[in-house]
Image: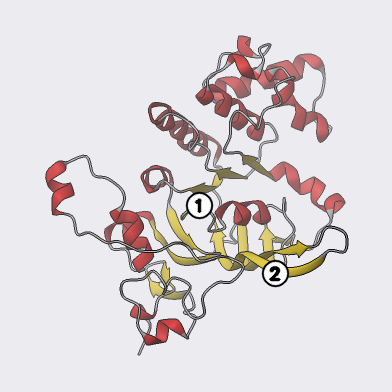
Amino acid sequence: MTQPLLRVDNLKVHFPVFKGAVFQHEVATVRAVDGVSFTLARGETLGLVGESGCGKSTTGLAAIRMLTPTSGRIEFEGQDISTLDKTQMQPLRRRMQMVYQDPYGSLNPRMKVRDIISEPLEVHGLAGERRARAEKIAQLMQAVGLLPDMADRYPHEFSGGQRQRIGIARALALEPSLIVCDEPVSALDVSIQAQVVNVFVDLQQRLGLAYLFIAHDLAVVRHVSNRIAVMYLGRIVEIAPRDEIYRTPLHPYTQALLAAVPVADPEVERARKRVTISGEIPSAMNPPSGCRFHTRCPHAFARCRTDDPPLVGMGSGRAAACHLHAAP
């Protein structure tokens, strides 16, 4: 087997909670990510989905070392980057980039588009001569569907979809092999989302990019992903090839998420089996014992309340963390 581009093994990211105005002391720990493992191949898209607050974005940030993990191992292009410091990470930053959720807040309003796109080149000492830099900026803007003569405008002169394209062009400037896409279309109008998703797909086909595509909208993830991982309360509860997870979801949480996705055909919608979950997501400071989903699961039984189910392979590239599918 070829070596994966990115390997994450038992990743944990915990945040201490302090109390006290003057003499602060730690009173609790938020277990934002608590034992996540996955691989990402070159040119592949892994969709990471789940409810807000489940740890998706924290996983993405830690995977490219924009957050320091509490524990676990992260390998990028065969190199262990788990404990590298800022100086050691600098050369690797060229190969891993990020597209942020908010196209309004992720661009400096005081900078022209050409300066925004060229900033990564300058940081890494790759800007080159002025003419070559201008040609590079023009190529990047064309690659994401923008006109090169827009380079002298400011972000406020663009629509949300255009701003996100600028963010994508900035991420492409250093020719990375991996881009973490943190809900890149959730802040956009539905009519624009498909256009931006198509930009990601086209760029991947032309450049061989790998994406860790974070989203809460399963309809969006379905169109862009090769595999899908479902997160709940800091853990991956199911991971499978895209078509398999939509055809036969194994974990009750995955089933509930898919049941919540509307279907355009009213007859099909009426005939669909309803899968509902009750209650609120437990606190990441005090997750339930046993299976973390058992407090909301309609199929929970005694073992679910005491034994934490591991993520077990089910064949065909599938894995699920559920006692319903565990061996007797």
**Circle 1 is placed at which residue position?**
52
Relative height, residue 90 to residue 233 (above, below): above
Can you see residue 71? Answer: no
Q: Horizontal placement of 225 versus 135: left or right? A: left
Q: Amino acid at mark 2?
A: Ala
Residue at left offset 36%, top offset 71%:
297
**Circle 2 is placed at which residue position?**
28
Residue at left offset 81%, top offset 29%:
122
Q: Position of residue 188 (x, y in %)?
A: 47, 31
Q: Nearer the viewer, mark 1 or mark 2?
A: 2
Disc 1 packing (10 Å; few <14; some 14–19; many ≥20): few
Can you tell which quarter of the image residue 305 is in?
bottom left
The C terminus: image quadrant:
bottom left
Q: Earlier in the sequence, mark 1 or mark 2?
A: 2
Q: Position of residue 62 (x, y in %)?
A: 67, 56
Q: Amino acid at mark 1?
A: Ser
Say which element carries label 1: loop
Can you see residue 53? Answer: yes
Disc 2 packing (10 Å; few <14; some 14–19; many ≥20): few
Q: Horizontal placement of 257 versus 184: left or right? A: left
Residue at left offset 87%, top offset 50%:
87
Q: Residue furthest front?
A: 21
Nearer to the camera, 188 or 306: 306
* Label 1 – label 2 distance at C-alpha: 21 Å
